[in-house]
Amino acid sequence: MSLDLPDVVLQTVLLLLLAPLVSGCVKNWKAKLQNRRGPPVWQVYADLLKFFRKDVVISEHASWVFSCAPYVVFVAALLAGLLVPMATARAPLSLFGDVLALVGLLALGRFFLALGGLDPGSAFGGMGSSREMTIAAVAEPALMLAIFTVAIAAGSTDLSRIVQFAQSPDWKWFNPTHVMAFAALFIVLLAETGRIPVDNPATHLELTMIHEAMLLEYSGRYLALMKWGASIKQLVLMTLLVNIFFPVGLAAAGPRAVALGVLIYAAKLLALAAAVVIVETTNAKLRLFRVPDLLSAAFSLGTLALLSTFLFQ
Amino acid sequence: MTVSTALLPVLDDLNKRFKGRLDAVRAPRADEIYIHAQMDLVAGFTAHLCRRWQARLVSLFADDARAGEGAFHLFYVFALDAARGFVLLRVPVPPEKPEFASLTNAIPAVNWQEREIQDWFGLKLIGHPNPRRCALHDDWPEVYPLRKDFDLRTELPPFQGARHKFREVEGEGVFQVPVGPVHAGVIEPGHFLFSVAGEPVLYLQLRLFYTHKGTEKLFENLPLPHCVRLAESISGDSGFAHATAFCHAVERAADTEAPPRARFLRSICLELERLHNHLGDIGAICTDVAFVTVNMHCLRLKERVLRLNESLTGNRLLRGMACLGGVRFDFDAGQIQSLRQFAAALRPEFESVVQLIESSASTLDRLKGTGVLKPEVARDLGVSGIAGRASGLDRDLRRDFPHAAYEAVKIHVPLYQAGDVEHRMRVRIAEARESLSLLEQFAAKLPDGPTRVEVGEPPPGATALGWVEGWRGEIFHWIRAAPGGRLARCKVKDPSLQNWPALSEAILGNIIPDFPVVNKSFNLSYSGTDR
């Protein structure tokens, strides 16, 4: 196994460019389902560009943590993305870490995100950070359990191995284990990306915010990095879902295969995004104290999935 | 002096009970009795009237009558729902001893109104539990803008005074969360200070009057027709209701009445105003729990009402429609027809939106049991309108004190008991249905005739109370006429002023992320409160 530089470059570019598009699609489709015209799908790119051009305003109460957090959040999300197989069946950085590293990187990003929310000492940021950590405390174990379920079946915690195993004839698609693990991971996806019913990404009501509350003090390029980092994280989690549970069309080698792989991957992502949109439009947001209930359900599903791998073996 | 038969026993009882202590009793109109008495009678009089006759103290205000009568006057306005009449107790306050006894301990509903008087007239409150500044903020200098010797054009130097000190809430893990006065979104200014332990709210302090515009002073400096336009702008969402309440007061003072057709047209416009506000609120409540689809439908329906408003009156918010003695524009047969068709067409669409809400378990789960305003608290605070009817207070001026053309129809007043966000929304849903039915009834029964009569100058010194059940609740305007078609005093009472303190009570024990939806379910006007 060696580090394949073109692979790294290709996947980095994919992560950077595809992430805002997925966010844009979700926004646009959500609007369509609500009888609105909605922002164009590339609006998120324009927003990022705008934020990068703007000045940064930093609260006088903020310390270095505040300026450092956006970079950590962004880089952690990007690195986590390189650990996940996207268009090809092999993750470019799988040499450097497995699924534990992935969960660790996501946790690192979240830790700094919460610090960034706390640092300027504003009431809203503090509320957002405390809520984020409350939710993460349940979401993270659920995420790990769900992934371990498939890791045990594949006999490895290396995501590339897991995906390669999933492509083998031994893989049973509608195994109840996988259905439960998928459901658990889907709930985690909603929670981790701040979607209804956990958080409302479109609200202006500071008192109800979770993710957005932590970003309230950010502006300019810092805000751009935070937003971009958040959509990359969303893409990473969605990739996990589509590639572990639906490992169709993952390319082996060669430019044509890779191109086809990218197309199929994009189609799978859009289908998952559509599922997220439907959940978001048909549900109201849960009362904050009900969110841990929902995540406990994900956790229980993950546990059951894990136990059932031993039962069905 | 003719008093309505329903009020006669009340009057007899008061004469007997307070024999020799009532300085004067006059009834300029059959349903409006003025009783003059001294300050020491207020507490006993109020207690008796409230207990024996279930009267409600709906408004309390002062009037600077030093020029004519050598004293400030305090007016306590009691509504007697059963007798369909108002009793106004007038009490003099001598200028050499400018103080008055507080009723707040007995009737918490007048808390803010008493402090307003203290701020605006410089009459010192005695025995008030919290006599701090309210209507004028703490940094204001010692001026009393509603006294007659305060000129409208006075320019005050930049404020140097101390800032407001909020009450401190202490304890382990208790945090203060300041919100406002400037908010995200298109919202008026108001400061909310939450004391929270984690997410649950322990205490909420409100600070309003950021948009105080001196409206009541302005009324005293404008000719009457201009005052109608001023009344229209007291609270933008209740423009027609405020203007009509004002016209109602002036017409009563001048002893005229709008012709029947004008009264019907007023009722139609009031119902249209109610309808578009209720539609907007139902959607907004759903938005605050992130069920945006309903809001989009509600906005669509609201837009149709606004367009109908424009086709009927030339203005989407019915601005410019109200005038003294009637309404400014008549509706022709085609417009009446389109109104009836509109009501018939809107009903099924509205019902499908209601169905959408009711089919969403996650939405109902958020609304049920959230922001409960208990009936006894609502009664103590004198909460009016939607919020009152959701907490079991069966009051509606349209039914209890029919104004405009409401006597011609039978009104079903929805009543709910739980006082939570869900029931405040259900009151709105039921009232929107009722509005559609009323629109059809008014359109069907619309009499012919003029839409306006000339309103002469009210005789100088004449006083009159005007009222309207606005979409949010009871609106009262009280005027005292001055020579030359002007006003010596205009007191504006918006339901928001009455209901704001209830918000502080309703939020207790709820979690802070639920505050926006609780606030929206009251949807109180800042401008109407601040004036």
Image (cartoon, rainbow, N blue to C red):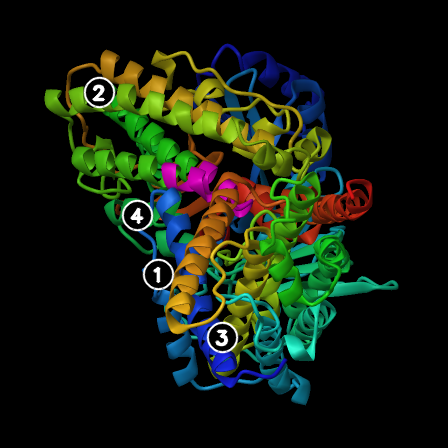
Q: Chain of mark 3?
A: A
Q: Chain of mark 1?
A: A
Res. A200 mark: none
Is residue A86 part of the magenta span, yes or no?
Answer: no
Whether labels 3 and 2 share one chain: no
Instruction: Please identify, in this view, whether the residue under mark 4 or under mark 3 is nearer the observer.
Output: 3
Badge 1 density bin: few <14, some 14–19, many ≥20, Cα 10 Å: some
The answer to whether mark 4 and mark 3 are in CB contact below 8 A is no
Disc 1 marks which amino acid? Val
Residue at screen point 66% across, 78% down: A95
Residue A73, position in %: x, y?
61, 77
Badge 2 density bin: few <14, some 14–19, many ≥20, Cα 10 Å: few
The answer to whether mark 2 and mark 1 are in CB contact below 8 A is no
- Distance, label 3 to label 2, CA atoms, is 60 Å
Disc 2 marks which amino acid? Gln
Q: Secondary structure at mark 2?
A: helix
Q: Residue furthest right?
A: B172
The residue labelled by disc 2 is B341
Residue B414 higher or lower than B522, as above or below: above
Residue A210, position in %: x, y?
62, 60
Res. A41 mark: 1
Sequence order check: which comes first, mark 2 or mark 4?
A: 4
- Distance, label 1 to label 4, CA atoms, is 51 Å
The residue labelled by disc 3 is A11
